Image (tube, rainbow, N blue to C red):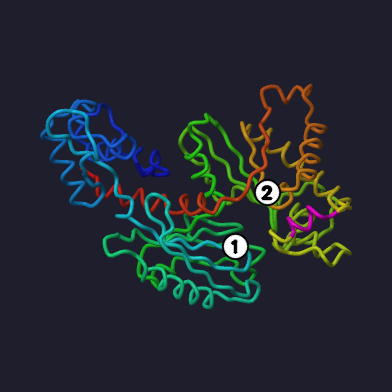
């Protein structure tokens, strides 16, 4: 059976008092089909305490909408005519997602199961492209992707998954070190250009939303995701069901830990942690000209590097950041991604430094011992998380009864 990522998020909108409450009933039946093991009409009626005729009518609507399909089991040991099984049809809905890797702009068509139906990319000069040039590339990529959307699928809209500082409600890209000419970019006009609804999301929020939904069975409570790479950013989520998406949250790279620091950040401020510990800053300040300003290449460089003394101050700053965030957010788990923590030696030095400045015996640490793990950025999670609001809205529209 096809698994639908983010299904808990999609179907939460249909929860009401009692399975037989009319409002959201169609959505709850769709939810049961998506999260069950190929149920039948009879089983749905029994489990949800509904009249068989009611279930049959709503199932037929879902089939007509293209959201589910019906089939007979390949083999049945039961006597008589086997009951028809109901399964979700994830290819019915799709979304077009723009996301960014280094200087490359990516555009992908994703269906409800998170399957990438088509993807295309374009290499650009991120430090030189202006707003009109950016929109032109988006339009070109969108045209290529929409041409590969199956005729039976409905496009739910576009989503921009962006790095840096993102004002999600205002659809504004505030700042990204990689894309300096796109600062304070009002992206609402992109909807007019593409002729479809466009939502704007911070990439780390997208990734963490899907990651948490996927790992819900593990019982993780509050999770803090930190990416340490070209820049330094964070996202936070709690399993009390709602994301913490306060505008501007997560820009830990622009916090100041040393008030005496005189380094200039690309954001226009002095003393930002990113200006001392971000990859772009380390590569700029280092006398070693071989340090690459590319996360994948830097990961390889760090694995082979024998003298990592240049990481002493960055590791100290990052350890203090972990302590401050632990005291502020009290996460149960901290997931670190990016090229720095992919090196076992560097990750170990970071966690050891954290333990040193936040010892077990500290009174303020009581009950605050997060599990710190090293992970990798997940393209799949980012795409699923970016598409989730588009799919949730469309499912809500189709199943509103």
Question: Is 300 contained in the magenta span?
Answer: yes
Label 2, label 1: how far apart the Cα atoms are: 20 Å
Left or right: where does residue 230 sit relative to residue 82? right
Question: Which structural element holds mark 1?
Answer: strand
Q: Position of residue 237 (x, y in %)?
A: 54, 39
**67 is higher (above) or lower (below) than 372:** below
In the picture, which quadrant includes the N terminus? Answer: top left
The dominant secondary structure in magenta is helix
Point out the tag, 2 or 1, that comes first from the N-terminus: 1
**266 is higher (above) or lower (below) than 115:** below
| Count of picture labels | 2
Name the residue tied to disc 2.
252
> 221 or 83, which lies in front?
83
Left or right: where does residue 398 sit relative to residue 118? left
Residue drawn where x is 64% and y is 44% of the image? 375
Q: Which residues are magenta?
A: 298-305
Residue drawn where x is 57% and y is 65% of the image? 184
Left or right: where does residue 378 sit relative to residue 253? left
Q: Position of residue 277 (x, y in %)?
A: 77, 53
């Amino acid at each position: 059976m096809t698994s639908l990522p983010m299904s808990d998020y999609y179907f939460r909108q249909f929860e009401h008092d009692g399975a037989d409450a009319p409002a959201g009933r169609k959505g709850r039946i769709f939810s049961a089909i998506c999260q069950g093991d190929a149920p039948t009409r009879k089983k749905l009626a029994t489990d949800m305490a509904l009249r068989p005729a009611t279930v049959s009518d709503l199932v037929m609507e879902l089939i007509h909408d293209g959201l589910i399909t019906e089939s007979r089991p390949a083999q049945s040991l039961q006597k008589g005519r086997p009951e028809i099984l109901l399964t979700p049809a994830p290819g019915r809905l799709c979304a077009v997602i723009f996301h960014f890797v280094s200087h490359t702009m990516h555009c992908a068509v994703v269906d409800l199961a998170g399957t990438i139906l088509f993807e295309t990319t374009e290499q650009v000069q991120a430090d030189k492209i202006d707003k009109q040039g950016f929109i032109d590339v988006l339009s070109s990529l969108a045209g290529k992707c929409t041409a590969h959307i199956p005729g039976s699928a409905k496009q739910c809209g576009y989503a921009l998954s962006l790095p840096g500082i993102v004002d999600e409600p205002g659809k504004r890209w505030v700042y990204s070190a990689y894309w300096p000419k796109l600062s304070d970019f009002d992206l609402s006009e992109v909807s007019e250009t593409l002729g479809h609804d466009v939502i704007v999301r911070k990439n780390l929020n997208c990734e963490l939303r899907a990651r948490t939904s996927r790992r819900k069975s593990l019982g993780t409570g509050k999770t803090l995701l930190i990416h340490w790479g070209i820049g330094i950013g964070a996202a936070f989520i709690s399993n009390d069901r709602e994301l913490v998406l306060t505008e501007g949250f997560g820009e830990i790279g622009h916090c100041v830990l040393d008030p005496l620091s005189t380094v200039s950040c690309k954001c226009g401020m002095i003393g930002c942690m990113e200006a001392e510990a971000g990859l772009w800053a380390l590569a700029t300040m280092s006398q070693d000209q071989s340090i690459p300003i590319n996360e994948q290449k830097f990961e390889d460089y760090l694995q082979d590097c024998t003298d990592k003394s240049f990481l002493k101050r960055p590791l100290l700053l990052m350890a203090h950041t972990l302590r401050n965030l632990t005291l502020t957010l009290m996460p149960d788990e901290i997931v670190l991604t990016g090229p720095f923590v992919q090196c076992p030696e560097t990750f170990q030095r970071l966690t050891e430094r954290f333990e040193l400045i936040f010892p077990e015996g500290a009174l303020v640490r009581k009950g605050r011992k997060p599990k710190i793990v090293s992970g990798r950025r997940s393209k799949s999670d980012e795409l699923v998380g970016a598409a989730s609001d588009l799919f949730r809205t469309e499912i809500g529209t189709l199943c509103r009864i």
